[in-house]
Image (cartoon, rainbow, N blue to C red):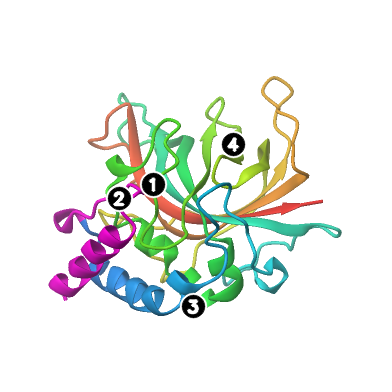
Amino acid sequence: MKLSIFTTLAAASSALAAPTWPAINPASLSSGGLEHISEYFNLLADKISKGPGRGGPNGPLVQTCDLSKATLPQAPVPLEPPSAGLVLKHVAVGRGTQNYTCDTANPSAAPVANGAMATLFNASCVAASYPDIASKLSALALQFDLSAFPTSGDESVRMGPSNLLVSGNHFFLDGKTPYFSLDTKNFGKLGHATFAKKSGTDAPADAPKGLKGEKAVAWLKLVAGGSEAVRIQATGGLEEVYRVETAGGSPPATCQGMPATFEVQYATQYWFYAK
């Protein structure tokens, strides 16, 4: 299985040499990682590489898929639906880290969430046209080396041999206020804003675990806003964001043996709704 998977990756890289391809380190794959990769690429080769939304070489990629056909994934205890009057504007796969702090003087204390950072990859057409593939994207994203993903303005990185180019980034302004930007050269100015948590629900019991067996973080509904001190007015009509299909990202139960600050790798899908 390993030979066929990495042969596929090599062939895809040769055919589409311009973008930078994230590296896969077999030694760091999560449990079942090779299976996640194999399933994804087997489906991808047949569907996505010839699908809509690839765009041309002389400007931003044009999203030609019908997002009205996409159905927001649901956990066993569903999140509340998008507000009336909003429409799905973008779906992205996020790959990055959940960040935590620990009181090292109190090893029995629970780690405290301290924001997150992630690179976002366009998955709109996958979600709209191929929900079977979309459901595998978070587990797949977790298998790529995080060090290969851009940390500055590099938007040439792809999630795999497909149209999954960088479509934005996500980080926290003060450890508590999530910020999303969907303004890129690849897709134009789709919008940016700060958000606040509206509600959450546990990830499904069979959600993909992290690289070290970490549980998947909760699914969330976020609404545009934030504290007065760090609020950034929404552009592009962005109003709500859902974090769904999470993989990994949860901290250990206590701070026993943990440093004062640490990161846990995660992947997820973000669904953006706008006016």
Label 3 vs 2, first from the N-terminus: 2
Q: Which of label 4 and label 1 is nearer to you? A: 1
> Image point 68% across, 36% down: which residue?
193
> Image point 57% across, 31% down: which residue?
176
Q: Is residue 91 above or below residue 134?
A: above
Rendered-image quadrant of the N terminus: bottom left
Label 1 vs 2, first from the N-terminus: 2
What residue is disc 1 on? 157
Q: Is residue 41 above or below residue 79?
A: below
Label 1 vs 3, first from the N-terminus: 3
Crowd band around label 1 with a 10 angstrom C-alpha radius: few (<14), some (14–19), many (20+): some
What residue is disc 4 on? 178
Disc 4 to disc 1, C-alpha distance:
23 Å
Disc 3 to disc 4, C-alpha distance:
29 Å
Q: Which residues fall within the magenta stretch?
A: 1-28
- In the image, what residue type sits under mark 3? Asp
Residue 69 in the image, given as x and y percentages of width and height: 69, 74
What residue is disc 3 on? 132
Q: In terms of depth relative to the viewer, which is nearer, 212 or 55?
A: 55
Q: Main secondary structure of the magenta part?
A: helix
Q: Which of label 1 and label 3 is nearer to you? A: 1
- In the image, what residue type sits under mark 1? Val
Label 3 vs 4, first from the N-terminus: 3
What residue is disc 2 on? 22
Q: In terms of depth relative to the viewer, which is nearer, 268 or 38?
A: 38
Q: Is residue 264 left or right of residue 134?
A: left
Mark 1 and mark 2 residues within 8 Å of each other at the beta carbon: yes
